[in-house]
Amino acid sequence: MHMRKIMIVILLAVGIVQAEEKSEAPEISRKMHTLQVNPLGPLLGSYAIDYELLLGQKHGVSLDLLYATGKDLGGNKLDGHGFTLSYRRHLQGRMESNFVGLFFRRSELDGDLKGDDERFSYHYRSLAIGPLYGERHIWKNGMCWTWKIGYGYPIFDFEWTSDRRPKHHGLIRGIMKWTTNIEAGASIGFAF
């Protein structure tokens, strides 16, 4: 199973490397849509698909659908979903551009983690709204990649669903609250 995930990531990376050089060709400046995915999803168990529509050459509206399942890198079980809606102002007046904007994210996650030689279960719901900055590159063949970073103001609800709590439950809750407000990622896909 891990070998298949590694192969998917390698194939995606090779596709990016073999993509044609960026160009200021007119067909790139006319791209109005992008559809992208998180290339590390199979390794991390956290999947995202993003669609963006460019309106009036400068205003982008983006919707990310989020899904987490399986185990994180620490072996902790995850099962969750959510979405992010964002407005992006494209600074160069086209889809291939740096952008600034605002995002709104809603997510829910059930999980468990190991501590003190037992497993502890939790559930959280999160809303976050905040500023966003990023950049998108598009090659002549339509392949594109994007990175973004932002941090949102949290509205956060976290509860332990197991009978017992881990020794450092307050610290764990604080880390969860802080990290769920980060809006960051890289994605690859196609512009059309």
Image (cartoon, grey):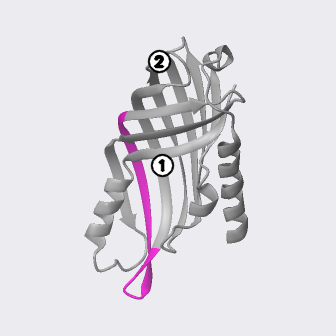
Q: Which structural element holds mark 1?
A: strand
Q: CA distance from mark 2 to mark 1?
A: 31 Å
Q: Is residue 112 above or below residue 36?
A: below
Label 2 vs 1, first from the N-terminus: 2
Query: Between residues 71 and 109, which one lies in front from this camera angle?
Result: 71
Highlighted magenta segment, given as a residue range: 113-131
Quarter of the image holding residue 153? top left
Q: Quadrant of the N terminus?
A: bottom right
- The location of residue 61, given as percent across then percent down, is 53, 25
Residue at 52 percent of width and 22 percent of height: 60
Quarter of the image holding residue 146? top right
- The location of residue 74, given as percent across then percent down, is 48, 73
Query: Between residues 43 and 111, which one lies in front from this camera angle?
Result: 43
Please name the amino acid that badge 1 sits on.
Answer: Ser
Q: Which of the numbered marks, if any, corresponds to residue 127?
A: none
Residue furthest to the bottom in view is 117
Please name the amino acid that badge 2 sits on.
Answer: Gln
Residue at 56 percent of width and 15 percent of height: 55
- The location of residue 144, given as percent across then percent down, is 62, 35
- Residue 1 visible within the image: no
Q: Is residue 191 above or below residue 8?
A: above
Q: Is residue 163 above or below residue 100?
A: below
Query: Between residues 93 and 88, which one lies in front from this camera angle?
Result: 93
Q: Which residue is mark 2?
A: 92
Q: Is residue 88 left or right of residue 190?
A: left
Categorize mark 2 by other alpha carbons within 10 Å: few (<14), some (14-19), many (20+): few
Magenta segment includes 125: yes
Q: Which residue is mark 1?
A: 107
Categorize mark 1 by other alpha carbons within 10 Å: few (<14), some (14-19), many (20+): some
